[in-house]
Amino acid sequence: MRSKILALLREAGDSYLSGEEMAKRLGVSRTAVWKHIQELRRDGYDIVSHSRSGYSLQSAPDTLRPEEIKNGLHTRRIGTEIRFYPTIDSTNLEAKRLAQQGAPDGLVVVAEEQGKGRGRLERSFFSPAGKGIWFSVILRPDFLPQDAPKCTLLSAVAVAKAAEDFGMKVGIKWPNDVLAGGKKLVGILTEMSAEMERIHYVIIGTGINVNIKAEEFPEELRDKAASFSEIKGEKIPRAAFFRAVLEHMDALYDAILREGFAEVFSEWRRYSITLGQTVRVIDARGGGQGAFVGKAVDIDEDGALLVDTAAGRRRVLAGDVSIRPQQD
């Protein structure tokens, strides 16, 4: 009902809409409308009222509630259903629970705050309240399980394209770190449940640092992490930015289902700051013992990084990649 009342107020624009008219159009009592208006005000919506004219929406809060995200969202799958939580331990954990209960393809879990956000290689991810976009998407694709890891590139490209829409230039370090000025803006973790020949679901968890000030990051992250507001030099409207991310994800996912990952790979190469660089790679499975240095030349059809070394070409499926190699 909240979302329907907001839709009516937005439709009215600068004009006032009476409680009686809203009640009639929604098939509820004027008292019910009044109660919902009070709830919306408590949540930060600036709704003014006039005894003879009714109600008018002046402004909306910086929130990631579904009614804000869906206001102007144009997607076919991703985001058509949104589950919102003021605070949560992990959106990925909640997405898994919902997926196991049969949640549909494209359902989005989003929270204002995470207590146990995780990135790649089991690293924790700083997810403060009201400062970022912490979300997970449930996908149920019909491709084979071995193709699922490529989905991690999908989210990185979608965020990079959204940043471009907002006039910001970022780069992607293999496989999915979105960076600006050498600092990390986004964390992405892709997880999957599958059988030998069939995917049950893929969960893409994404954490976007949107409006975190430099001094608000934990001290150990200040030289490693940044936010989009720092790049832009002004506060970013989170709901609008999130809509852009979801719309790009949806378009790329649609292209994947129709034609495979070619478009995602092409766009990833366009944003890559890894290709053409000398890199140091630490194999995630080798405890650092398999470290080597070479030139990153491309990604292959599996999304693996191809690195030319003195001993020949190496193919990297999982590991830590630094663009400025350490001196041994």
Image (spheres, rainbow, N blue to C red):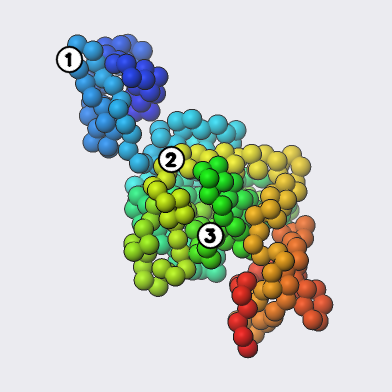
Give the residue pinned by disc 2.
Answer: 239
Task: Name the residue rendered at 55%, 42% in the picture.
Answer: 165
Q: Is residue 27 visible?
A: no
The reply, left or right, for residue 164 in relation to residue 237 is right
The residue where tag 1 is placed is 51
Looking at numbered disc 1 in the image, what kind of residue is underneath it? Answer: Ser
User: Could you tell me how far apart the alpha carbons at marks 1 and 2 are, in whole angstroms?
Assistant: 32 Å
The alpha-carbon separation of the residues under discs 3 and 2 comes to: 21 Å
Q: Which amino acid type corresponds to the residue marked 2 in the rendered image?
A: Ala
Q: Mark 1 or 2 closer to N-term?
A: 1
Mark number for residue 195?
A: none
The residue positioned 42% from the left and 51% from the top of the image is 233
**Which residue is at the front of the view, 160 or 31?**
160
Residue occupying the point 42% across, 69% down? 221
Q: Secondary structure at mark 1?
A: loop
Q: CA distance from mark 1 to mark 3?
A: 51 Å
Q: Can you say which quadrant of the picture contains the C terminus?
A: bottom right
In the picture, the quarter occupied by the N terminus is top left
What is the x, y in percent for residue 310?
79, 81
From the viewer's perspective, tell me whether residue 102 is left or right of residue 227. Answer: right
Q: Which residue is mark 3?
A: 180
